[in-house]
Amino acid sequence: MTTTELRRNPMAPPLPALTPHAELALLARTLHREGYDDHLSGHITFRQPDGTLLVTPWGLTWDEMRASDIMRIDIDGNVLEGQWTVTPAIPLHLELHKVRHDVAVVVHNHPRWGTIWADAHRVPPVYDQTGAMVPEDPVLYDDFGGSVDAVEQARACVEALGDGRMALLANHGVLVVGTDVAQAHHRSVVLEWRCRQAWHVEAIGGGVPVRPEVFAKFSAPFDHVSFPGLFEAMARRELRADPTILE
């Protein structure tokens, strides 16, 4: 096969047509496998063209999420659609969506490795190219004031994030935003990878971080195009394991 033919060749079998509800359910499933799995904690919102928000329900773990489980709320948190309960911590998402109109997807959870660095009030260095696939360091919000179900605390976290892509919330967890599901998935995966690798590197006595200028140059393209095919590949894996996700 020539180089030209290779470039024209599909990367992999396409996913079936996905509704926004199915996209969100698949995002929850794929991130659970990546370590976003703190029991019933964690929530994802997905802004729709009409301004409403799709949201993962409270009370279901992310590895059991199906399209039919996804809830719809308005920007004030009122339930418009769905059979389950919305998390009391929804103010974090509502306050963020009100001020970040560039953001479609908001992910909050307490993943294993990201939360270690959040607990340490430290930003992990970048030690490899996978950890360098999101520009700039995550914001560190180092003033834990309690649960984000309080509007004041939610607003403080949102203000700390500013126009950033990701944040470590001290003594709490992580916050990741994206312009679409694929970008939110990409950034969430890269953040957890970066945190895990840095912990292991420190455990063996330390390492040599990627040089800042290399990090900046390497990461820049990923702000416009998420790692090609990543979300689709991980979604196919989940659908092979459980085709009922789309129900």
Image (tube, rainbow, N blue to C red):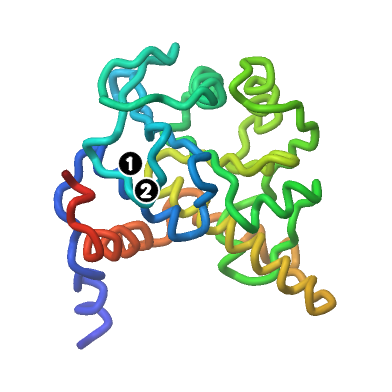
Q: Looking at the picture, does residue 204 appear above or below residue 17?
A: below
Identity of the residue drawn at 28% across and 16% down: 80
How many numbered discs? Answer: 2
Query: In which quarter of the view is residue 25 placed?
Result: top left
Between 8 and 160, which is closer to the camera in this rendering?
Answer: 160
Q: Amino acid at mark 1?
A: Leu
Location of mark 2 (residue): 27
- Circle 2: element type: helix
Q: Looking at the picture, does residue 142 appear above or below residue 49?
A: below
Q: Looking at the picture, does residue 2 appear above or below residue 203?
A: below
Q: Position of residue 135 (x, y in %)?
A: 61, 52
Identity of the residue drawn at 79% across and 79% down: 204
Q: Are marks 2 and 1 in contact (CB under 8 Å)?
A: yes
Q: Position of residue 129 (x, y in %)?
A: 59, 70
Identity of the residue drawn at 80% across and 50% down: 120
Identity of the residue drawn at 63% across and 23% down: 154
Location of mark 1 (residue): 24
Q: Position of residue 92 (x, y in %)?
A: 56, 25
Between 32 and 163, which is closer to the camera in this rendering?
Answer: 32
Circle 1 residues within 10 Å: few <14, some 14–19, many ≥20 = many
Q: CA distance from mark 2 to mark 1?
A: 5 Å
Between 80 and 183, which is closer to the camera in this rendering?
Answer: 80
Report the side of 54 relative to 149 (left or right). Answer: left
Q: Position of residue 116 (x, y in %)?
A: 71, 54
Report the side of 3 relative to 199 (left or right). Answer: left
Viewport quadrant of the N terminus: bottom left
Q: Amino acid at mark 2?
A: Leu
Q: Is residue 167 visible?
A: yes
Q: Is residue 218 visible?
A: no
Circle 2 residues within 10 Å: few <14, some 14–19, many ≥20 = many
